[in-house]
Image (tube, grey):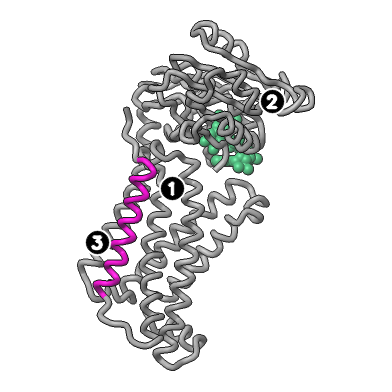
């Protein structure tokens, strides 16, 4: 069993780090006098916390396997987005209170004090450029702006965060009271930054490169599953060493002339063997549409496995609830789980239903149950996933673990219906197909 770091352990470690940062400030501050001193003190605390928070922000997205497995990529992405807002608040608060505090102490105006800081204090100009870069990244991440640009543009603009961190680093040692006075503080702060940089390089560059060389992944074949859906079979060597579990996903990079520069997350749609993996992809845009034309032999870089959407095999009674292409991870789980397993597969039309023959064969071989709930609400005469319907389709529902994957709208209503039907919230697990 691969190791996993759970949400509580990670949050406790982050909080302990923040407490250590506050202790560092306390240790380096002899006294605070007057309004200027208090404002400067507040600015220093905000600056130290910003310098720490930005490292945590990068750590959350470093794709560290035990963290991804224990917490889930979608939750990490949400924490990262929330952390980004904290960082912007801390950095902006730091800049403004420091200027204000220095201005009050020097009996100068904030404008002239800003000019003094930019021209007379070492590396403050670079740190200011870093602040504007971070504001730019925050702007493109705002929902309204993000919706207007492609995922790749938004994603690659995020790399400016690394530049901002590099630009802001030196001003911390050159100007920060906690560091100018203490070699020990400078040493441990550098260790923190170096450690996170190493983890990023290790998990985002070295591990995928090593796995590429080790497993020699190639497209083995493409199979049409439905009008808009294809399965891609990927062959390789010693795939068991990847320790991928049903429910997990990889980030796939297909090395063709048009696709090599982007990687996309797709879940395993079958239990992987030592030589073969399978994903199943619905055409929703440029990348997913292009996969139907992949040629056998195309080389593949698969980064992963990722995700905490992994069934707990100790519960003997499980409900799998799929909506549309959300069937993919649940199809893999359906074949892997033992005990009493019920699969409810919701789709708008029969054309959207994939794997029907496979699902029926698995159900028959294992004595499991599949219910296809197909059609519009109107066709089906009401809410097809109401608490009453769910209880009827899955008798003993309140004792089951539920794994749910579908479009965001369906996920929200299904979680509410399951809770109303008596399933404790801790037993409802879901995967979101968007970060
Ligand atoms: C954990 C996870 C597992 C997934 N598993 C499957 C699966 O098994 N089968 C399947 O058909 N789809 C799956 N998806 C969805 C799939 O990744 C997107 O549909 C696909 O990346 C869309 O790319 P596109 O260029 O075709 O479409 P676009 O029009 O470029 O994108 C459509 C939407 O997909 C999302 N998206 C685009 N590129 C990426 C990316 N590189 N990383 C993350 N999200 C992106 C964005 O929200 C975007 O708005 C999964 C997504 C996630 C997050």
Residues in magenta, as a range:
6-28
Nearer to me, 372 or 135: 372
Which residue shows up at 50% across the image and 35% down it? 425
The residue most toward the left is: 184
Nearer to me, 267 or 343: 343
The residue wearing badge 3 is 188
Main secondary structure of the magenta stretch: helix
> How far from the left and from the top, in percent, is residue 312?
41, 26
Q: Secondary structure at mark 3?
A: helix
Q: Is residue 290 magenta?
A: no
Which residue shows up at 48% across the image and 68% down it? 131
Instruction: Give the label, 2 or 1, closer to the camera.
Output: 2
When the figure is inspected, residue 203 is found, relative to residue 39, above or below; the finding is: above
The residue wearing badge 1 is 61
**Between disc 2 and disc 1, whose residue precedes?**
1
CB at disc 1 and ligand 1 closer than 8 Å: no
The residue most toward the top is: 365
When the figure is inspected, residue 106 is found, relative to residue 337, above or below; the finding is: below
**Between disc 3 and disc 1, whose residue precedes?**
1
Q: Which mark is residue 203?
A: none
Instruction: Give the label, 3 or 2, closer to the camera.
Output: 2
């Amino acid at each position: 069993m691969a190791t996993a770091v759970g949400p509580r352990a990670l949050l406790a470690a982050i909080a302990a780090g923040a407490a250590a940062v506050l202790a560092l400030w306390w240790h380096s501050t002899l006294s605070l006098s007057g309004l200027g001193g208090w404002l400067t003190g507040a600015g220093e605390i905000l600056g130290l916390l910003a310098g720490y928070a930005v490292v945590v922000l990068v750590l959350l997205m470093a794709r560290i396997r035990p963290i991804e497995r224990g917490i889930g990529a979608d939750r990490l992405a949400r924490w990262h987005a929330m952390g980004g807002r904290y960082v912007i608040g801390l950095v902006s608060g730091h800049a403004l209170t420091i200027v204000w505090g220095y201005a009050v102490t020097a009996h100068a105006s904030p404008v002239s004090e800003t000019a003094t800081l930019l021209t007379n204090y070492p590396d403050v100009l670079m740190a200011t450029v870093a602040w504007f870069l971070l504001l730019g990244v925050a702007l493109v991440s705002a929902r309204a702006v993000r919706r207007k640009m492609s995922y790749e543009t938004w994603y690659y603009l995020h790399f400016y965060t690394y530049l901002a961190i590099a630009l802001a680093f030196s001003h911390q040692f050159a100007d920060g009271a906690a560091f100018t006075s203490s070699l020990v503080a400078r040493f441990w702060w550098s260790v923190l930054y170096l450690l996170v940089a190493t983890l990023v390089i290790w998990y985002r560059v070295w591990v995928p490169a090593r796995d590429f060389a080790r497993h020699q992944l190639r497209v083995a074949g493409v199979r049409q599953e439905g009008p808009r859906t294809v399965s891609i079979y990927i062959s390789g060597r010693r795939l068991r060493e990847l320790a991928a579990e049903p429910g997990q996903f990889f980030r796939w990079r297909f090395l063709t002339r048009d696709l090599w520069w982007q990687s996309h997350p797709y879940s395993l749609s079958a239990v992987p063997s030592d030589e073969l993996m399978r994903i199943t992809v619905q055409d929703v845009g440029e990348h997913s549409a292009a996969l139907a034309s992949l040629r056998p032999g195309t080389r593949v870089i698969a980064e992963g496995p990722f995700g905490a959407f992994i069934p707990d095999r100790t519960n003997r009674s499980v409900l799998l609830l799929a909506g549309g292409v959300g069937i993919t991870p649940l199809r893999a789980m359906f074949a892997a789980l033992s005990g009493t397993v019920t699969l409810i597969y919701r789709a708008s039309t029969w054309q959207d239903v994939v794997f029907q023959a496979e699902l029926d064969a698995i159900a028959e071989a294992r004595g499991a149950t599949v219910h296809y709930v197909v059609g519009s609400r109107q066709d089906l005469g009401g809410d097809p996933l109401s608490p009453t319907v769910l209880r009827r389709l899955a008798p003993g529902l309140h004792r089951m673990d539920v794994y749910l994957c579908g479009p965001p709208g369906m996920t929200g209503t299904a979680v509410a219906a399951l809770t109303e039907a008596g399933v404790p919230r801790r037993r409802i697990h879901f995967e979101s197909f968007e970060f």
